[in-house]
Image (tube, rainbow, N blue to C red):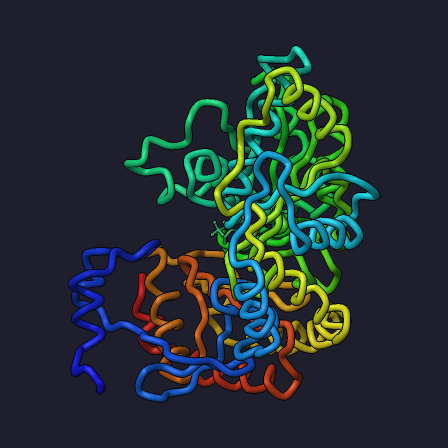
Amino acid sequence: MTKNFNLESLDKDYLFHPVTNLKSHLTDEMLILEKGEGIYVFDKDGKQYIDGLAGLWCTSLGHGVSELAEVAKEQMTKLGYSTLFSSKSHEPAILLAEKLIEMSPFSSGKVFFGLSGSDANDTQYKLFTYANNKLGKPEKKKILARKKGYHGVTVASASMTGLPNQHKLFDLPKEHFIHTETPHYFKEGMDDETEADYLVRLTKSLEELIEKEGAETIAAMIAEPLMGAGGVILPPEGYFPAIQATLNKYDIPLIADEVITGFGRTGNAFGSETYDIKPTSMTLAKALSSGYIPISAVIVNDDLFEPIKEASGDIGVFGHGYTYTGHPVSCAVALKTLEIYERDKTFDHAKKVGEYFQNSMKDILVEDYVGEVRGIGLIAGIELYKDPSNKIAFEEAGKAGKILSDACQKNGLIVRPILDTIALCPPLIISEKEVDEITDKLKKSLQEAKDEIMKVH
Ligand SMILES: Cc1ncc(COP(=O)(O)O)c(C=O)c1O
């Protein structure tokens, strides 16, 4: 029997939405999705959309992958839950940890599982704290992050995040979290400043911050290879080798937050490869299971693991872990996801289609309110400006981005507006023909939204 209900009014009555304007939500139009197939999703009325952000930067294999559903069913039937506490273990977690080390830039190391990018970054903070206490460096506690960086929403990870709306009224960031400059040449570079000069300025500013805070107080720096939720911001040429040289000088390890960039997004397995990053530890989530089931991972190198192991021996237990750390169903689905990536050469495909995608996105620059199109592999950001040639942004930040993203949605393309940047991050399995569909819908939307956007101050 079909129950007669109105999903939209039930949603407004009962659901507490994350990262939403909770007030305007009560009167705003909503999008209620029902199913997906490949790069497409369908709403409850059957309208088709391209899932232009792969859900939330995660559904790398697209929708409706029955192999993932089957493996979840098999694992649930066989062993639906088991813990990794107190030396208990199980095959899916063991094999997944082994596979991740094999794929990662680490020649050896250990893998700690969580459920989200946020809890994994919280784990990162705790691991460095724990290790430094054992190493007799109790003052080495601060995490150095970047303005506009995004690392999640738990107390520690939101403190790493450098976005004001994640801090306001939450009394964040907490003590121990500091932020250096956003590396965005197009926006932050000064007139007549070359990209190389800009990089020198950025590195100098990082060094000044380290000196001001005291290098001996900084446990680690955390950085996304490219900033995703901060607006798809790509580092200037040579950025990571330059800042890592500075960090090395002060004995500050680097945490690579690969929650978006991990697993083929930038055209290589990891963004660390694309941008020549040498991390001490790495955070993974999202495409680790193609977004089908919650799972995250922190990979630590042997140097970081060693003092943690020793300290836990002194205390009698390593006092950190979740009920769902290494959940067998999550691990089985992740393992299958990695197997599919390998079998279908998904990362090679993403690299090839990524080049096509980036070329197609450049066509968008012709519109007279598009200032910058940036991207790599299968991720892109299109930033709207009031006056692009003079790099004058809209005063009413966010309005133009919302108008364009609404137009895209009306035309069957889901994108994410990040203030006035439109973010695109389609499933890695996208074909060139489907990229053309994105480009066509985007161009149509840019034209249709033009008059309204031109009126924005
Ligand atoms: C780079 C990065 N780190 C961490 C997170 C937080 O992950 P989660 O939303 O799974 O907690 C995100 C989420 O988008 C992210 O992009």
Residue in the picture at 33% in, 31% down? 171
Question: 295 or 278, which lies in front?
Answer: 295
Q: Is residue 380 visible?
A: no
Question: 348 or 102, which lies in front?
Answer: 102
Name the image quarter holding the N terminus.
bottom left
The picture quadrant where one finds residue 215 is: top right
Q: Is residue 232 above or below residue 342?
A: above
Q: Is residue 244 above or below residue 338?
A: above
Residue in the picture at 74% in, 59% down? 269
Q: Position of residue 190 (x, y in %)?
A: 59, 44
Q: Is residue 170 visible?
A: yes
Name the image quarter holding the C terminus.
bottom left
The picture quadrant where one finds residue 287 is: bottom right
The picture quadrant where one finds residue 25 is: bottom left
Left or right, 362 with reference to 451: right
Left or right, 51 with reference to 269: left
Q: Position of residue 150 (x, y in %)?
A: 50, 46
Question: 311 or 180, which lies in front?
Answer: 311
Q: Position of residue 147 (x, y in %)?
A: 50, 40
Q: Is residue 387 above or below residue 220?
A: below
Residue in the picture at 56% in, 81% down? 38
